Image (cartoon, rainbow, N blue to C red):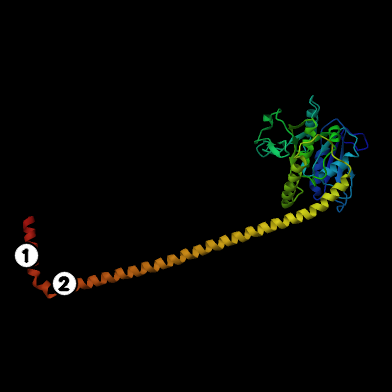
Amino acid sequence: MIVSLANDPDIVAVVPTLAGNLPRLRACIDSVCASEIEERLAIVVVWNDPRVERVDLGPVTIFEPGLNLGLPGGMNFARDAITAPRLWIIQDDMTVPSNCLRSLMERQDQADNPAIVSPVILNEQGRVPAKSRAGTVRSDGVMDQWYPFDDLSPEAFDPDVRLDWVSLSGALVRCDAWDAVGGMDPAFYPLMHSDVDFGYRVTRSGMTVVLEPSAVISHQRNGSTPSLFARFLYERNAERFEAKHRTPRSVESEDRSESTTEIASREASVMVVDFAQYAERYIDGTRDMISALEQSVAEHYQHFLNIQSQAVALEAQVHERDREIEQCHLDSQEAISRLMASRSMRVTRPLRFLGSLARKIRRD
């Protein structure tokens, strides 16, 4: 049942968005609205790009923070206004089938009451792609293994595999667990590794996170992020995660002395410089690679020219040798002709005839 945020919902789906692709955003929200549950579901959209004019998205509540808070900042911003016991994290480049939320809720309602239940995605073969939805972290803060380890059918999931974190796209989160660790860290701006950090803090606090293979979503991964920027964010936030968790420490909630807006503003301003430097290094590296390729092509072309020159020289030598052989043949023919026409050949012709006749008689 879809209700407004003010109508005491049991679950709130939160959709942070830059609204850069409105048809995709509408498809996402329509799929959430089609969820088949008896519980009361409200939908909140965090409008992260103030440059884009708001549009009617149906039965949703729209929050406008006035700047791009990123996904973790947007989730924190929404959480501060939500009283429901569960959050459903929705990215604007995904859609959910009508039974997805029900499957997530049924798993969370089991005896172990996991703090986070995350759905899966399927490839064209109907299998969950390797390294797509969860993982483990070493004690020194380095991401260790990704799960599933290989492409896996939903029926083959091992419920006993220990997970330190799960992907938050489509994940259902208990709000008490959210609050216990201080929510998401907006410093993982605007998105990447924020789910790893949040899940790892949840599991280090003694709670569990799980995947639910019966809950399936469709997700256009990095659908809102240009490829070079996505690569930059992955590397940058991976380093941030390792630095944050390198030294084992007692579990405590995130320091919220700074507001989400302050953290996101700082990270966004610093990121402009960091990405400019990263892009410059990338351009320099690409330029060096192009120069090396040009040098390699030039060297190979010169090698080809050298071989071609050698082939021309060899061909000339062959022609010269052929000419010499032809001349020798002509000289030999001329010498034979002179010999056959000589006086000695005429004088000895009868003797040669008799010799030939004698040999024939002996054979007979």
Residue holding disc 2: 340
- Please determine whether, in this image, residue 2 is positioned above or below residue 258: above
Q: For marks 2 and 1, give the CA distance.
A: 18 Å
Q: Residue at x 82, y 51 (%)?
A: 268
Q: Report the residue that reaches farthest toward the top.
A: 111
109 to 273, vertically: above or below: above
Q: What element does badge 2 sit on?
A: helix
Query: Which amino acid type is marked by label 1?
Result: Leu
Q: Judge from the rendering whether residue 245 lies leftward or rightward of residue 66; answer left or right.
A: left
- Label 2 amino acid? Met
The residue that label 1 is drawn on is 354
How would you rate the neighbour count of disc 1 (Cα within 10 Å): few for under 14, some for 14-19, many for 20 or more?
few
Residue 81 quadrant: top right
Q: Earlier in the sequence, mark 2 or mark 1?
A: 2
Residue 334, position in %: x, y? Answer: 22, 73
Q: Residue at x 60, y 59 (%)?
A: 292
Nearer-the-camera pick, 307 or 39: 307
Q: Report the residue at 53% width, 61% height from top.
A: 300
Residue sitting at x 79%, y 55%: 273
Q: Secondary structure at mark 1?
A: helix
Quarter of the figure with the N terminus: top right
Residue 132 x %, y %: 70, 39
* Quadrant hosting residue 120: top right
Percent coordinates x, y for residue 242 in the rendering: 74, 42
In the picture, the disc for residue 201 is none
Viewer-side residue, 267 vs 157: 267
**Residue 97 seen by the camera:** no
Q: How many marks?
A: 2
Q: Is residue 194 visible?
A: yes
Quarter occupied by the C terminus: bottom left
